[in-house]
Amino acid sequence: MNKEIYDFANTIKNIKNIGFTYREAKDIYEYYVTRLQNIFLFNEVFEFDNDYTTNATDCYNTFVKFCVENKVDVPTQTAFGINMSKFAKKIRTNSGYIYNVKIKENRRI
């Protein structure tokens, strides 16, 4: 059996043993795996910095470029915004939205 499949099955089993149904255990597992993937992907592109802000459109365009280069599914702008708001503060300005992140130097467009 593939190690990843075994680990997945074992993790689901461990969550079920706590008292959740199979469906609940699977949902919990998928939620945390997706969240970890998002954290990893965002960490590859951005530095989180409360003293620095970047235009939301620039953030999205840079992230799209990263996803295309790395053959990762490109999120919609709405999905990106929802996920980004989980990691960075979103601020509305007269000229649009900004996030308290800095695009990593090697990722600039």
Image (cartoon, helix red, strand yellow):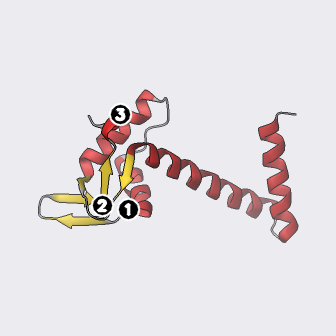
Q: Position of residue 19 (x, y in %)?
A: 84, 71
Identify the disc placed on residue 7. none
Q: Provide the residue designation for mark 1.
A: 88
Q: Nearer the viewer, residue 72 or 39?
A: 39
Q: Secondary structure at mark 2?
A: loop
Q: Are marks 2 and 1 in contact (CB under 8 Å)?
A: yes
Seen at 25% across and 48% down, the residue is 57
Q: Where 64 falls versus 22 (above or below)? A: above
The kind of residue on which mark 3 rests is: Lys
Residue identifier under label 2: 100
Marks 3 and 1, the one that precedes in the sequence: 3
Q: Which residue is mark 3?
A: 65
Q: The C terminus appears in which quarter of the rendering?
A: top left
70 relative to 31 in the view: left or right: left
Q: Residues within 10 Å of mark 3 (few under 14, many from 20)?
A: some
Q: Position of residue 96 (x, y in %)?
A: 18, 58
